[in-house]
Image (tube, rainbow, N blue to C red):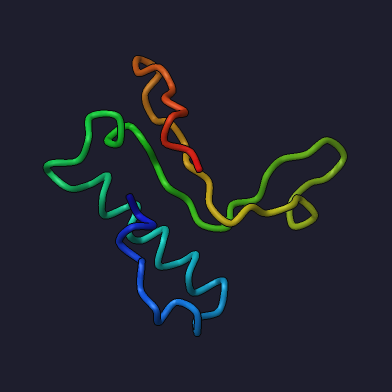
Amino acid sequence: MGRERLMSPDLSQWEEPDITGELVQAMRTIVQEPDAPSWAVHLSIHEDPRVNQRGRRGKRCPMVDIRVERTSCQVPPDYRHIF
């Protein structure tokens, strides 16, 4: 859904970190909208978080572009929407 909001020919001229930032903002907006899908309201979107890895700490941990985190354990994960 966030990607659909970014579909623009102008994106081809953007740098990757700018596209990631805009995508994260679009995704955050979607999950906070009053008419958001019920599964989406239980998600938290993060940009460039570090991922813990055995033997690596702090700044030595790898980063991912976008992390989508489930915030409620009552809702089973729904992987049908992952690209």
Measured as percent of width and height from the top left, residue 1 is found at: 32, 49
The structure residue drawn at horizontal position 44% and vertical position 77%, both measured from the top left corner, is 11
Residue with the most extreme bottom position: 13
Q: In front here: 6 or 48?
A: 6
Residue with the most extreme front position: 9
Residue with the most extreme left position: 34
Q: Is residue 60 left or right of 80 when viewed as pictured?
A: right
Q: Is residue 28 left or right of 32 when viewed as pictured?
A: right
Q: Is residue 71 above or below residue 27?
A: above
Measured as percent of width and height from the top left, residue 65 is found at: 58, 57
Q: In front here: 72 or 6?
A: 6
Q: Is residue 43 left or right of 17 when viewed as pictured?
A: left
The structure residue drawn at horizontal position 33% and vertical position 57%, both measured from the top left corner, is 4
Measured as percent of width and height from the top left, residue 15 is found at: 55, 79
Measured as percent of width and height from the top left, residue 79 is found at: 47, 28
Picture mark count: 0
The structure residue drawn at horizontal position 35% and vertical position 61%, both measured from the top left corner, is 25
Q: Is residue 73 above or below residue 11?
A: above
The structure residue drawn at horizontal position 49% and vertical position 79%, both measured from the top left corner, is 12
Q: In front here: 68 or 80?
A: 80
Q: Is residue 52 above or below residue 18?
A: above
Res 56 → quadrant: top right
Res 7 → quadrant: bottom left
Q: In front here: 56 or 43?
A: 43
